[in-house]
Amino acid sequence: MDEVLIIVGDATETVDTLYPYYRLIEAGLKPVVAGPEKRTFQMVLHEVKPGWTITKEWEGYTIDADIAFKDIDPEKYLGIFFSGGRAPEYIRYDEHLVCTTKHFFEAEKPIGCVCHGVEIPAYADCVRGRRMATVPKCKFDLEVAGGIFMNEPCVIDGNLFSGRTFHDHGHYIGPWIAALLAAQKQLESSS
């Protein structure tokens, strides 16, 4: 088992998505992009520009989903990554994504999450009592669902690895990938 899901939708943040995507390949794992449908999705770039008090957004690259949420068999995947951007605001309501999300938390498989990605496990009622990093403007989404907000570049709570924004990728992605590789090794030795 070497496949890892990366959850996207239109307005998924480009760096949030591509950094873990290529790091997974580098580690010998296979990223599988999953979206509401199997199609091309428009990613975006987010940054708070000098003089701005809110995030500015503009178009980034596109990415093709390898699989639609409804077609995911979560048993086949080693882990999952919830990318940020605005996509989580609407894809979190997809019933198939909710079921997939619950599987990874219940099975204690390695989970990576950044920025607005927290809105998906929060909506799926998977963050209760869990410590997570997220962008401060999503603190409410996490806490209203029973999670514990941590304003740190890397928060590890059991099988859950999270960062605030793409600026934190260098802190939490490495430990998440190490957990994926350890899980893969354990599966290979038990079969």
Image (cartoon, rainbow, N blue to C red):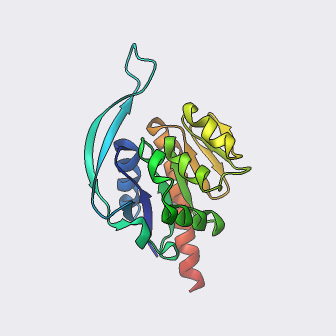
The answer to whether any part of residue 53 appears in the image is yes
Q: Residue at x 34, y 62 (%)?
A: 37
Instruction: Name the residue at the bottom extreme.
Output: 191
23 vs 190: above or below: above
- Pick the front one: 17 or 98: 98
- Locate residue 49: give its quadrant: top left
- Locate residue 15: give its quadrant: top left
Q: Residue at x 44, y 71 (%)?
A: 72
Instruction: Name the residue at the right extreme.
Output: 129
Residue 153 place in picture, x, y as percent: 56, 37
Q: Residue at x 32, y 61 (%)?
A: 65
Relative to residue 78, is residue 126 drawn left or right?
right
- Count of marks overlaid on the render: 0
Residue 167 place in picture, x, y as percent: 45, 35
122 vs 188: above or below: above
Q: Residue at x 38, y 16 (%)?
A: 50
The answer to whether any part of residue 152 appears in the image is no
Relative to residue 170, is residue 12 drawn left or right?
left
Residue 82 place in picture, x, y as percent: 48, 52
Instruction: Name the residue at the top extreme.
Output: 51
Quadrant of the frame with the C terminus: bottom right
Relative to residue 4, is residue 130 drawn left or right?
right
Residue 12 place in picture, x, y as percent: 38, 46
